[in-house]
Image (spheres, rainbow, N blue to C red):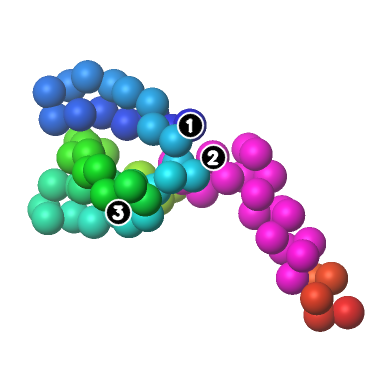
Amino acid sequence: MIYVTKLNGKEFQLNAAFIEQVEAFPDTTITLLNGKKFIVKEDEKTVRMLITEYYQQIQVLRLIAEVEAAENE
């Protein structure tokens, strides 16, 4: 889960695994796999960093690297 802030200042948790797209319109808009959209205060770069940190915490990025390494053997 990542913590982001709505435009009204309320912080909430969002499951990063369900994020399909992050855009700036200029407000940062997060689109989930189900089509639901959230507009947040954080900029696009910050949201990408939060997502990356989340995947590192749950070690998804390491697992992907291990699978790719095994496929190249």
Name the mark on residue 1.
1
Distance Cα–Cα, label 1 vs label 2? 7 Å
Name the mark on residue 22.
3
Q: Is residue 41 magenta?
A: no
Mark 1 element type: loop
Which residue does the image show at 37% across and 50% down from the upper left?
Answer: 33
In the rendered structure, which amino acid carries the disc numbered 2? Tyr
| Magenta span | 50-68
Q: Is residue 53 magenta?
A: yes
Q: Residue 11: x percent and y percent? A: 29, 21
Structural crowding at the residue carrying mark 2, measured as other residues with C-alpha within 10 Å and reported as few (<14), some (14–19) or many (≥20):
some
Which residue does the image show at 74% across and 70% down from the upper left?
Answer: 68
Structural crowding at the residue carrying mark 1, measured as other residues with C-alpha within 10 Å and reported as few (<14), some (14–19) or many (≥20):
some
- Which residue is labeled 2 in the image? 54
In the rendered structure, which amino acid carries the disc numbered 3? Val
**Which label's residue is closer to the chain start, 3 or 1?**
1
Q: Is residue 10 above or below residue 50?
A: above
* Tags 2 and 3 touching, CB below 8 Å: no
Q: Residue 46: x percent and y percent? A: 35, 45
Q: Residue furthest right?
A: 73
Q: Is residue 24 above or below residue 68?
A: above
Front position among marks 1 and 2: 1
* Tags 1 and 2 touching, CB below 8 Å: yes
Q: Is residue 20 shown to the viewer in this render?
A: yes
* Tags 3 and 1 touching, CB below 8 Å: no
Which residue does the image show at 22% across and 43% down from the upper left?
Answer: 37
